[in-house]
Amino acid sequence: MNMFFFFILFVTFFCLDGYSQEMPTGGNVQSGTATISGYGTNELRIDQKSQKSIIHWDSFSINPKGRVDFNQPSSSS
């Protein structure tokens, strides 16, 4: 029984650890003008150039050590 418990604990730890490292992926600007930089890092930056933008994401998760900055041209964007 103890070996089974440790096996489950081991598998769960590694699965959750990999999941927690996720950051947003597959950002595709559908409307407006924006640039996305920082893929593959813990810091993703979205610089919106137009007043309105629509971005479609394949997935959008931010790991505990991650950071995502949305920079917009004005407070009314």
Image: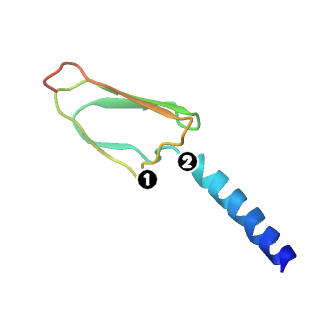
For residue 70, the mark is none
Q: In which quadrant of the rendered view does residue 29 lie?
A: top left
Q: Where's residue 18, x and y in %?
A: 65, 53
Q: Amino acid at mark 2?
A: Glu
Q: Quadrant of the C terminus?
A: top left
Q: Which residue is mark 2?
A: 22
User: The residue tagged with tag 2: helix, strand or loop?
Assistant: loop
**Is tag 1's residue or tag 2's residue first in the polypeptide sequence?**
2
The answer to whether the residues at label 1 and label 2 have Cβ atoms under 8 Å apart is yes
| CA–CA distance in space, label 1 to label 2 | 9 Å
- Residue depicted at x 17% and y 21%: 75
Q: Is residue 6 above or below residue 56?
A: below
User: The residue tagged with tag 1: helix, strand or loop?
Assistant: loop
Q: Where's residue 66, x and y in %?
A: 53, 35
- Residue depicted at x 66% and y 52%: 17
Q: Is residue 64 above or below residue 37?
A: below
Compare residues 73 and 63 and report the one nearer the observer: 63
- Residue depicted at x 55% and y 47%: 22
13 to the left or right of 69: right
Q: Which residue is mark 1?
A: 59
